[in-house]
Amino acid sequence: MDEYGNSGEGRATRRDEAVRAAVEQGLLGPDSPIVGLLDVTGIRESAAELRAAFAEVTAPGTPVLHAFAVKATPLVPVLRLLREEGIGAEVASPGELALARAAGLSPAQTVLDSPAKTPAELREALALGIAVNADNPQELDRIDGLVRSAVSRSPLGIRVNPQVGGGSIGATSTATATSKFGVALRDEGAREWVMRAYLDRPWLSRLHAHTGSQGIPLPLMAQGVAETYALAEEINRRIGRPQIDTIDIGGGLPVNFASDVTAPTYAEYARALREAVPGLFDGRYGLVTEFGRSLLAKHGTIVARVEYAKSAGGRAVAVTHAGVQVATRTVYVPGSWPLRITAYDGKGRPKSGPEVVQDVAGPACFAGDLLAEGRALPLLDQGDYAAALDTGAYYFAHHYAYNSLARPGIYGFVPAHAGGVRFATVRDPQTLSSIVAESGGAHAGALTTLHAPGSR
Ligand SMILES: *Cc1c(COP(=O)(O)O)cnc(C)c1O
């Protein structure tokens, strides 16, 4: 195991111990058949690895803000933990900004990037002094108005799309020719428009690009950063002073969903960037990063009880409590988002025995609600548990309310003395009254009392 536990052995051991302890301590059981677990030790390790990776490649004294993409795991205690680890927040909606503020993040640690910011959102961000990257010319017009009418400390920039192409997953490829994000740099006249925008606005000091997420190969990510850097250099040369002082390179480091190993690592990416874009690290530019999935994915586990074990058409089917509501992408697009599943017995101990090809199904009422199809695992039985691994980002924190299934409780864990495990509640399980309230419960008669003229 290396310094950061990237071989994943410690991670797997901690996970197994947490599953057993969750059963022993009653977090998991017949009446609470699904939980999300977060490995606090692992999250801290990833945050430390991120900081160290960029500290190693940047010139001494370079300002670097690592802003966690809140959308990856929008949970206040997670944001607070990351804050303690020196990580800020990248937000993309009023809700995400509210979460970051609730976690105690300061405006200086926060970056706003959404593609559809309203005038009110922009006004608030500039009033607070939060960094904003304008997505398009219309948004820059709005910012012009705000900058004219009030003094703001917000560092301001423009988001560009270097259009370097997509990766293996279309839905997470943001630098395609027709992506909805940023100013499409290779379109006719776009580069000149960006140049003019900076020439006319001495207060524009940042440049931002996010080339995409899972499925983008490292060289393509590095190319996106290289093109952004080249544009910043060109703009500063033309203006004759280092007006752009900070480059925001986005996030997007892919995650290995095939084993417990962290690959690629932040250190590998940082070195690849320094090789591809040495000038970015020589101290002339401050850096912002916006990693999401790579900080959290490997530290989350969904554990669900097997309610029934059945057989259909010769196929063993374990019907569990984890499906589309907690693993939406995997259920709808299984080819792009396969998850590892591990089997535990009714006491939460890793299950052994011969592997049997089986389906691990969810609780939702449609046939495609499968966490895994045709997976070889020790045969899951009634009362066992199935765990979906690497689900700390874009999974259980992204509840999908199909079938009015309740949001599961989420618990953080650390190893305790004497081989035990300590848990802390990150999010309470959703109650039935909360489901009713969120489903218009306060307006039960709203439609029956709404009559069109002439009807009774
Ligand atoms: C989603 C997103 C990120 C984070 O992407 P990950 O793949 O989770 O690292 C960063 N920046 C922007 C602008 C995003 O939209």
Image (cartoon, rainbow, N blue to C red):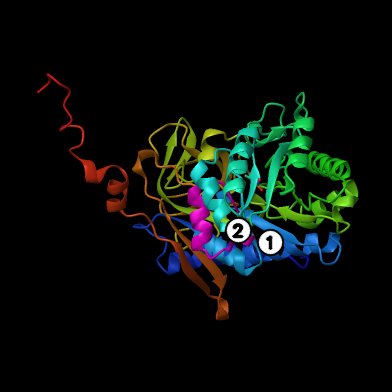
Nearer-the-camera pick, 167 or 61? 61
Q: Is residue 97 magenta?
A: yes
Q: Is residue 323 visible?
A: yes
Q: CA distance from mark 1 to mark 2?
A: 9 Å
> Which residues lie in the magenta part?
88-108
**Pointers 1 and 2 in contact (CB under 8 A)?**
yes
Q: Secondary structure at mark 2?
A: helix
Is residue 429 toward the left or the right of residue 69 in the image?
Answer: left
Q: Which percent across, then down, holds residue 325? A: 44, 43
Residue 198 quadrant: top right
Q: Is mark 1 within 8 Å of ligand 1?
A: no
Q: Residue at x 31, y 52 (%)?
A: 434
Farthest-out residue, bottom: 418
Q: Is residue 273 magenta?
A: no
Is residue 64 toward the left or the right of residue 417 in the image?
Answer: right
Q: Examine the rendered structure and indicate whether residue 159 appears above or below residue 70.
A: above
What label sits on residue 46 in the rendered view?
A: 1
Q: Is mark 2 within 8 Å of ligand 1?
A: no
Mark 2 lies on residue: 299
Name the amino acid, label 1.
Answer: Ser
Q: Which percent across, then down, holds residue 155? A: 67, 53
Q: Examine the rendered structure and indicate whether residue 168 appears above or below residue 256.
A: above
Indicate the quadrant containing the N terminus: top left, top right, bottom left or bottom right. Answer: bottom right
Indicate the quadrant containing the C terminus: top left, top right, bottom left or bottom right. Answer: top left
Q: Which percent across, then down, holds residue 124? A: 52, 51
Q: Secondary structure at mark 1?
A: helix
